[in-house]
Image (spheres, rainbow, N blue to C red):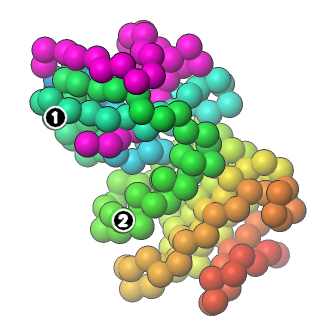
Amino acid sequence: MIAYKGFTKDLQGWGGFQFKPDVWYREKECKTVRNGFHCTEYPLACMQYFTPGDGARYFEVEIGGEIDEDEWRIAATEIRLVKELNLKEMALFGIQFMVEHQKRTDWELTANHISVHKDFAEADIIAIARGEDPKVRGIIGTICGLIREKDGEIIQARMFTVGRELDPGAYGLTEDGEIRRCG
C-alpha cells in the first residue's frame, strides 16, 4: 500500500526514529497512536506534524505487514521510504486524494503555513479551497489549489503557484475552469 509520511530534515520520525530511503523497517506490532510506523493516505495530513518551511521532508512510502487505521492515520508493521516529494507534489497529491475520495469529510486542515478549507483558504506555503465557488489567497511562492464542486461532486480542480503564473492576491475559477482574479 502506498501512503505518505513526514520527517525532520534529518529523516527522523515523530518519535525520533531514524530512517533512510529505500530500506525496509519492521516492528512487531502496530496500533494507531501507540506503536508501529505511522503514515497517512492523505498527503497533507502529515504536514500537521512536520511543518513545511522548518526543514521538514515528505516521502511517498510503501507499507505492509499488519496495518491499523483510524480516521486518516495509518500504523503499519513494515515501511519503506520510496520517493521524496517536494511541496508542489504534496499539494498535487493532496488535491488528487480529495478528487479520488470526494465523499470523505476529513480533508480540511489548518497547520503552520497551510490552509485547506471549504470555500476560502489563505496561506503562505499551501492554500487549497474546495466548494461551489472556491477562492484562495497567497503571497509569492504560495502553492494554490482550487477544487470546484457542484451538487456534492467535484467537477474541476486547478493548481498554480503565486508569482510564477499569477501575481499575489485572491483567485477563484470561472465557469469554464479558468483561474480568475477576485476583487
Residue 165 in the image: above or below residue 23: below
Asked if labels 2 and 1 touch by Cβ distance under 8 angstroms, the answer is no
User: Is residue 48 in view from this perspective?
Assistant: no
Residue 59 in the image: above or below residue 43: above
Q: Is residue 100 left or right of residue 32?
A: right
Quadrant of the frame with the N terminus: top left
Please report the bounds of the magenta region as a residue range: 1-29
Q: Residue at x 32, y 35 (%)?
A: 62
Classify mark 1: residues with Cα within 10 Å, few (<14), some (14-19) or many (20+).
some
Magenta span contains residue 22? yes
Give the structural element (helix, strand or loop) at label 1. strand
Q: Give the mark nearer the N terminus: 1 vs 2.
A: 1
Magenta span contains residue 169? no
User: Is residue 15 in view from this perspective?
Assistant: yes
- Location of residue 178 in the rendering, given as x and y in whole percent from the top left corner: 69, 81
Q: What residue did someone put label 1 on? A: 68
Q: Residue at x 63, y 54 (%)?
A: 127
Give residue 181's mark: none
Residue type beneath disc 2 = Glu
Q: Quadrant of residue 160?
A: bottom right
Give residue 100's mark: 2
Residue type beneath disc 1 = Asp
Residue at the bottom extreme of this rendering: 175
Residue at the front extreme of this rendering: 22
The chief SS type of the magenta part is loop
- Location of residue 65 in the rendering, given as x and y in whole percent from the top left corner: 15, 29
Give the structural element (helix, strand or loop) at label 2. helix
Q: Quadrant of residue 106?
A: bottom left
Residue 118 in the image: above or below residue 89: below
Classify mark 2: residues with Cα within 10 Å, few (<14), some (14-19) or many (20+).
few
